[in-house]
Amino acid sequence: MNKYNFSPGPATLDNSVLEIVNQNILEYENEGFSILEISHRSDIFENILENTKKNLKDLLNIPSNYKILFLQGGATFHNTFLAHNINLKKSTSNLVTGTWGKKTYEDFVKIRDSKEIFLKSSDISEFIKDPSLAVNQKTDYLHITSNETIEGIQLRNFDQIENDLIVDSSSDIGSYKFDWNNVAYIYAGAQKNLGIPGVTISIIREDFIEQNENPTYLNLSKLIDKDSLLNTPPTFSIYVLKLVTDWMLNAGGVEYFEKQSQDHSTNVYSMLSKYSDHVSLPVEEYARSKMNVVFNFKNEQIEKLFLEESLENNIIGIKGHRSVGGIRISLYNSIDKSAVEYLLKFMSSFFEKL
């Protein structure tokens, strides 16, 4: 029985990608070995690496003055990695709109003097409408988390912020277009919108890169010099990233997925608004994530029943994060129209019985 996976990550993959992976696990393109066994020093993997970078450049419209790295350790590793690779003479601030932004700030201040800019939920909508109202900091780099998966808060128009930005885009990369003018460094774990766990995509503006005396794997300039091959990279995760970006480009690129994201999220939020007697939406409309729809039932017993019946109907991964509870429906790029229609049909049937 097919499951409808709305997990916050690792996320579902398109069937066409899974079919290619399945074929190449046993033998990669008639080469006599599995893709799992490929050497990172081989010409075959070098070709995969270069094509993956090309795909990302085409998909995200990355300017020529940016470098691309494929790192390990997840986006969380970057909390330490970035703090070590920003010149201590340069100032940093952290915009905190949720759990992951807070964790980044807490790690930054263990290494460098960084200022926290906390936005209360009541301020977030105004900030998103006009970021300049909330951020008027004389800081060299401002770190933001573009989409908070736990709270369901998204900052999509960060190009309006005047500061140079460091962006954790783990859960919404590839789902909308943005202007690169103020982006110094953007990074994302692949396992939500671009692939599977194991690889973190890092896209770095050249003027951000500085020489330093950091230990080898904490040294950005050395990693760039070695073109992601300073040590053995996560070859299989990079391969799947290539396949996913192939699929996304063939589907119509970011423009296609931006429209899909808008359509999916609008339909789910409209359903919830229709049944507002039973559910509440904790995030103001303008700040609501198009990737992670978060809501609460006003009656805990009904919420428990909703989760039970969703599992009976083969819908998985929608229980809210343990820190906030409630329900969380994740609508990443690989969630297609048929899955959302199935979800909405279930939700409508459930609400009509109440």
Image: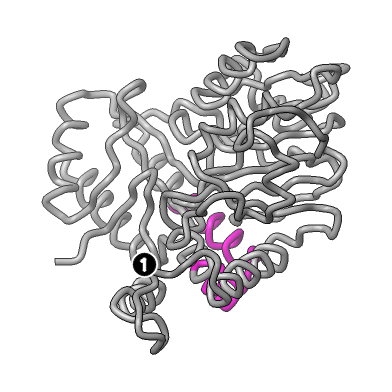
Pick the residue in front: 190 or 46: 46
Q: Magenta residues: mostly which secondary structure?
A: helix
Q: Quick one: label 1, few (<14), some, or many (20+) residues within 10 Å?
A: some
- Residue 162 in the figure: left or right of residue 187: right
The percent position of residue 107, horizontal first and vertical second, equals 57, 18
Residue 59 is drawn in which quadrant? Answer: bottom right
Q: Residues in magenta?
A: 244-267
Q: So how many labels did they put on this image?
A: 1
342 vs 207: above or below: below
- Residue 140 in the figure: left or right of residue 190: right
- Residue 45 in the figure: left or right of residue 196: right
SS under mark 1: helix
Residue drawn where x is 75% and y is 62% of the image: 61
The percent position of residue 15, horizontal first and vertical second, equals 35, 73
Residue 147 is drawn in which quadrant? Answer: top right
**Which residue is tagged 1?**
36
User: What amino acid is labelled 1 in the image?
Assistant: Leu
Residue drawn where x is 15% and y is 26% of the image: 301
Quadrant that contains the N terminus? bottom left
Q: Does the segment drawn in magenta span residue 247?
A: yes
Pick the residue in front: 108 or 146: 108
Q: Does the segment drawn in magenta span residue 148?
A: no
Residue 272 is drawn in which quadrant? Answer: top left
Residue 5 visible in the shown view: yes
Quadrant that contains the C terminus? top left
The percent position of residue 196, horizontal first and vertical second, equals 42, 55
Residue 266 visible in the shown view: no
